Image: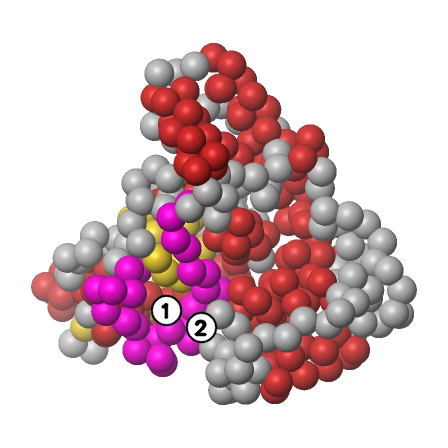
Amino acid sequence: MSVTLDRHSYPFTAIVGQESMKLALILNAIVPTIGGVLIRGEKGTGKSTAVRALARLLPEHDVVEGCHFGCDPTDVDALCSDCRGRLRAAGVLPHHRRRMRVVELPINASEDRVVGTIDLEAALRTGTRRFEPGVLAEANRNILYVDEVNLLDDHLVDVLLDAAAMGVNVIEREGVSFSHPSRFILVGTMNPEEGELRPQLLDRFGLCVDVEGIRDPDERVLIAERDAAFTRGDHEFNNEFAAADANLSRALGEAIGRVREVRVTANHARLISSICVEAEVLGHRADVVIDHAARALAAYRRHGSPSREDIYDAATLALAHRARQPLRRDQDDTTSPESGEEQEGSQPSDSEAGDPQASESEATS
């Protein structure tokens, strides 16, 4: 897959550092049911830069022509009511291919702007439900980016997390209801110095990473040099990272296609559960998240089943905001919990995957 750089989108593979943040985004791209990621940290650490850059790397998908929700024409069960009606009438849904987009939620958004509105007068007068789509409609099959999520009204955060968990947005007004698909990758960012999220809301995010500014002088110089090269449109910079992004895009596409083949057994489940028990995690959501993230990581690293390293790496991201005791890793975490033998397969090399662990820009988020 080719990736063309533009003047407004910094390449993902040119980003310096912030390995955990990049990995959390990649895993959610492979398995969106992980439940999104909360990125905590100071401003200017490349949070929004990474999110926008990732969207350009993801495979294109089919969307129904003229659909407000970008329905998948091949997923009949998930079609909105309009698309179902069109399919019954015509027997086919015209469609085109589109790349995933980043939909941003304004910090001052009202509930109607988020969930959409129903024209009650039209419903009462004609019996027709006329729906004005909101942010959750735009976000379907895309990335929903919420900056300063900790400053949103708790009720709005609840609405976002409910839709992310169920994959459906339900609007009810004066006895009139409307629902539509709303499946998206949720990325929230926050500065803890400006206030925390309630624990109940915090737990609803699948993964969590803490980021801070780069302290290494050489890496800070590299950040500045790459930023300058990007700003002036340096051809050598563009060619190098367009190729690297294309390799990473290819690796992501392969992982998305491979993840259903990843084999997870009872031994994997027992290891995940023991990790959660040892970390004194409340509830059972973490077990499910680690399972999904470990599958994604195994697919990305070309493992037939998750190794202990895959599971512990997934647990590190899933328990950052849940663990009440420190996570202790096995001394030998490169083996499969199932066989005890070293796991086959390997993580994509720098040349194949565009160095997914490579650098993060200190571009302002």
Q: Nearer the viewer, residue 148 or 249?
A: 148
Q: Residue at x 41, y 20 (%)?
A: 229
Q: What is the magenta range?
A: 186-214
> Is 67 situated left or right of 194 in this image?
right
Q: Is residue 105 left or right of residue 181?
A: left
Say the numbered circle drawn on residue 283: none
Question: Relative to residue 112, is residue 281 drawn left or right?
Answer: right
Residue 172 x %, y %: 24, 73
Give the quarter of the image for residue 232. top left
Identify whether 287 is placed above or below 47.
below
Q: Amino acid at mark 2?
A: His
Does the magenta-highlighted stretch encompass residue 179? Answer: no
Going by the image, does 69 lie left or right of 279?
Answer: left
x 62%, y 37%: residue: 355
- Mark 2 or 1: in front is 2
Question: Is residue 197 covered in magenta?
Answer: yes
Q: Amino acid at mark 1?
A: Leu
| Element type at mark 1 | helix
Does the rendering let one see residue 16?
yes
Q: Which residue is mark 1?
A: 161
Q: Residues within 10 Å of mark 2 (few under 14, many from 20)?
A: some
The vertical placement of 347 against 334, above or below, is above
Q: What x and y, as percent, mark residue 50?
A: 43, 43
